[in-house]
Image (cartoon, rainbow, N blue to C red):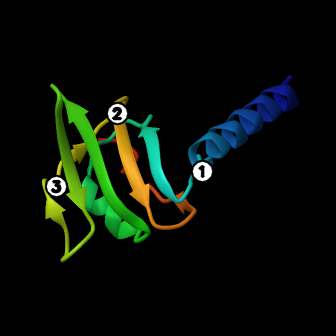
């Protein structure tokens, strides 16, 4: 019985760590890409661009108005917060894999 409990505890630990370390890769194609982020913590457009220098611009549309941030002169436009379940247009100058900021892991 003790061995079964130990094995179950070990399996739960392994599964927990694999779920935490699992990352989703998002490949972007040269030009326009439409992305919906599925995460729990918001971050700024400027942060995404700093992590991904191939991004030329990122934008979203709300109430028939487009809000954007462009990767020129250190960043031009509104440095908006990227939020969960919102659709963004990301323009990249070359095929690339999107790097997201690390999550803090809790509060």
**Left or right position of 4 against 104:** right
Mark 3, residue position? 79
Residue 45 visible in the current orientation: yes
Residue 75: percent from left, percent from top: 19, 68
**Mark 2 vs 3: CB contact within 8 A:** no
Residue 23: percent from left, percent from top: 59, 49
Residue 103 visible in the current orientation: no
Q: Secondary structure at mark 3?
A: loop
**Residues under labels 1 and 3: Cα distance?**
24 Å
Who's the residue at 13% across and 58% down the image?
Answer: 77
**Left or right position of 40 against 28:** left
The relative height of residue 107 versus residue 104 in the rendered view (above or below) is above
Tell me the quarter of the image containing the C terminus.
Answer: top left
**Residues under labels 2 and 3: Cα distance?**
16 Å
Mark 2, residue position? 84
Residue 89 vs residue 48, the one in the foreground: 89
Mark 1, residue position? 25
Q: Residues within 10 Å of mark 3 (few under 14, many from 20)?
A: some
Residue 56: percent from left, percent from top: 35, 64
């Amino acid at each position: 019985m003790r061995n079964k409990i130990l094995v179950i505890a070990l399996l739960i630990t392994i599964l927990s760590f694999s779920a935490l370390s699992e990352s989703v890769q998002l490949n972007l194609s040269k030009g326009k890409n439409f992305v919906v982020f599925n995460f729990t913590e918001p971050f700024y457009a400027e942060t995404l661009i700093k992590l991904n220098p191939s991004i030329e611009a990122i934008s979203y549309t709300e109430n028939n108005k487009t809000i954007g941030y462009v990767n020129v002169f250190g960043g031009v436009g509104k440095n908006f917060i990227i939020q969960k379940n919102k659709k963004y247009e990301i323009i990249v100058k070359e095929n690339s894999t999107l790097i997201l900021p690390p999550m803090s892991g809790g509060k």
